[in-house]
Amino acid sequence: MINTNLKRLRKIHQYTQEDVADKLNVSRQSVAKWENGESTPDIDSCIRLSKLYNVRLDDLVNHSEEISGLMVPPKGKYFFGAVVVGERGQIVIPKDAREVFNIKSGDRLLVLGDEERGLGIVHERDLINFIGNIGIVTKEE
């Protein structure tokens, strides 16, 4: 998996093997061996590669495009799978998504919509924190 991810990410970022080697201070031959599956980068190189490509270390090493049908996601971006809308419009948020975003039973989520960009779901606490951070001032009359 890692060899496929390394090759794919390098091409997406339009780097040559020489570019990657220079950025990591390794030989071009090392990069070629990693991408061909002849060897595996050490942990320090994996950490530097994940930073170079802005992906999670776990995704760099374990992500399978063949299984998921998706390329390695950028750090902080997730694809949790599809949900089915019930008769009354209800959906079930996947467990992984609830864990990543700390969503608990009884939490209030806001459903936002934009006809051009689609739907978004935001936790109420995040909107409150956002509004607090932009310093909205209200006038008292």
Image: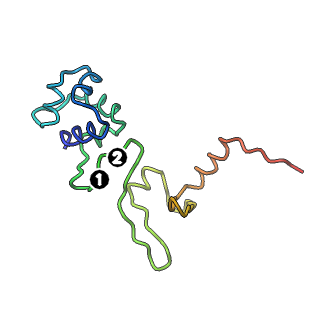
Relative to 43, does residue 116 appear above or below in the rendering?
Answer: below
Q: Nearer the viewer, residue 113 or 122?
A: 113
How many residues crowd around disc 1 within 10 Å: few (fewer than 14), some, or many (20 or more)?
few
Q: Residue furthest top?
A: 25
Residue 47 left/right relative to 135: left
Depth check: give the residue in front, 38 or 58.
38
Question: Who's the residue at 29% across and 36% down the image?
Answer: 14
Instruction: Identify the residue at image location x=16%, y=33%.
Output: 34
Estimate the spatial distance between the alpha carbons at disc 1 and disc 2, rounded to whole Å.
8 Å
Residue 136 appears left or right of 112: right
Disc on res. 70: 1
Q: Which of the 4 image quadrants contains residue 133? A: top right
Question: Disc 2 designates what residue?
Answer: 73
x, y percentage for residue 115? 54, 64
Say whether marks 1 and 2 touch (CB < 8 Å): yes
| Local SS, label 1 | loop
Q: Position of residue 96 (x, y in %)?
A: 38, 55
User: Residue type at mark 2?
Assistant: Pro
The amino acid marked with disc number 1 is: Leu
Location of residue 19 in the rendering, given as x and y in whole percent from the top left corner: 26, 26
Q: Residue at x 54, y 56 (%)?
A: 122
Q: Does 35 sit above or below residue 21?
A: below
How many numbered marks have been drawn onto this rendered protein structure? Answer: 2
